[in-house]
Amino acid sequence: MPALGPREEQACEALAERLVALDPCAEQAHRALIRIFRRRGKTNDAFRQFLACKEALKRELDVEPEEATRALVERIEATAELGEPAADRGPPQAELSLLEAKAARPAVSVPEKPSIAVLPFQNMSGDAEQEYFTDGVVEEITTALSHVNWLFVIARNSAFAYKGQAVDVTRVARELGVRYVLEGSVRRAGSRLRVAGQLVEATAGVSLWADRFEGDVSEVFELQDLVASRVIGAISPRLEQAEIARAKRKPTESLDAYDHYLRGMASLLEEALPQFYKAIELDPDFAAAQGATAWCYFWRMANGWMTDRQKETDEVSRLVGNVAIAGQDDAVALAFGGLALGYVIGDYEAGSALADRALALNPNCAAAWSASGCLKACHDDPDIAIEHLSRARRLSPLDPLTFFMQSFTAFAHFVAGRHDAAWPVAEAASREQPYYLTGLRVAAASNAMAGRLDAARRYISRSLALDPELTLSNLKHRVGQIRPDYFAKYVEALRLAGLPE
């Protein structure tokens, strides 16, 4: 195979990094990065990439790296010991082509209303520790824009699929189905902060607006509002001032609380909870932190991780009560709180009311559409559930939580008796996230009721490997107090699939 040139190698590296970000178990992408590091003489980086690959496979799939990956690393070790230079070749062209094929995404139709995606901003601080702060600035700008009713705003989770890449805004707009793209940078040095942004009309490749704003870190919310207002003004100079005012909000007066909240949002579940609690300690009225904490307990229940069920459910009640009072203008906090209230506590009517309030506040909030869809799938109307989950996926087509939306879409089909529609969606969710227990259980149940017993038993086997204590008798501690007739059908299907009593 011919060697790749510098530009082709850079393209391969960007694609491989994107695939690893989307799926930490993408071994072919890991191997591409290992080869690139070795070709550049960065042997230690190549070994670190291998260790990252090995840890991800063990953590998420409980498997070892493939023979091809081990052989590659052994060859690098051998040449390193001999002091030989790396082979002067990049990843083979076939591998680049395959990575491109995997990373390629179909075009999405552009809605009639003005539509925008806010891409991850560059962290210009020279400090990787400030990455979470930069991401937080982008999230607040996205939220401010999403409060404008006439705008269609792609959710932050999907826009962040492009993080760390040199992107072509025309391609991004095509893949996300938007007309405008906002990109920018954040520089934080001591107490000083600079936020720069550029708004591009992607189809024409024309910059509509570009500017930068400087101030003290204590003015971060005002700087974010300035960026959002200028973007809105560039898209529609006729925007009513009332809409701009509605887009502006301060989630908390405490910058320290805000800092811990951002650290929590950038962390894994068990690492996030202490950060959220610290944020609440610093500002007891910080609704976003309260909602995010309740959301963590939702995931703990769904995965069977609760250690003191009564204590944790009581804590969810307390947190959601605070969200309902303090989060009157925070759609995400209300959505997270409503989801936890329904799933963990079993109060689906109150949970749905919070989700409905979130949707009224912010019709662009993918989290609110997703939460509403989940609640309706578990307790209400499966067809409306599917409609709401579909809306969430359109607002966030590259969302890392796509598997969550797929799982409850499949469950809605399941309870509606459309088993042949349910199992392909449930299996897609399990491929997207192979250790998500809800997806595995729904795949088992829908396959069983569709007469696909061999497939159903495979999913039950996988579920029990991840959750050995799961039985029909304790199933309610994983799925919450869903509607009784839905639960009875779920038990019947999982019994047929082979889940023990």
Image (cartoon, rainbow, N blue to C red):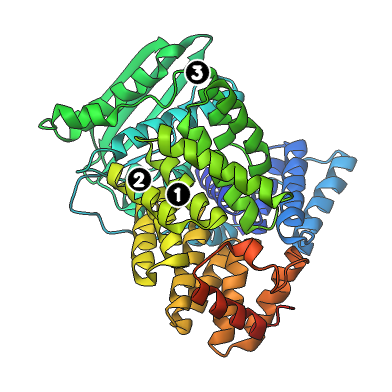
How many other residues sit within 10 Å of disc 3, few (<14), some (14-19) or many (≥20)?
some
Most foreground residue, 330 or 162: 330
Confirm or deny contact between disc 1 and disc 2 (CB under 8 A). yes
Other-residue count near label 1 (Cα within 10 Å), few / some / many at <14 / 14–19 / ≥20: many
Label disc, if present, on residue 358 of the rendered structure: 2
Which of the marked residues, 1 or 2, is nearer the chain's N terminus? 1
Q: Is mark 3 on a helix, strand or loop?
A: helix
Using the image, tell me which numbered label, if any, was put on residue 158.
none
- The residue depicted at 55 percent of the width and 63 percent of the height is 481
Note whether 380 is above or below 448 in the view shown.
Answer: above
User: Disc 2 residue type?
Assistant: Ala
Q: Position of residue 340 (x, y in %)?
A: 52, 50
- Residue 168 lies, in percent from the top left, at 37, 43
Q: In this view, does 299 lie to the left or right of 243?
A: right
- Locate the N terminus by quadrant: bottom right
In this rendering, the answer to whether 288 lies above or below 454 is above
* Residue 63 vertical placement versus 462 (above, below): above
Q: Name the residue under label 3.
A: 255
Name the secondary structure under disc 1: helix
Look at label 1 and name its amino acid. Answer: Gly
Neighbourhood count class around disc 2 (C-alpha, 10 Å): few under 14, some 14–19, many 20 upward: many
Please report the residue visible at 61 percent of the width from the left and 26 percent of the height from the top: 278
Between 70 and 201, the one nearer to me in the picture? 201
Quarter occupied by residue 264: top right
Q: Earlier in the sequence, mark 3 or mark 2?
A: 3
For label 1, the residue is 338
Judge left or right: residue 22 versus residue 349: right
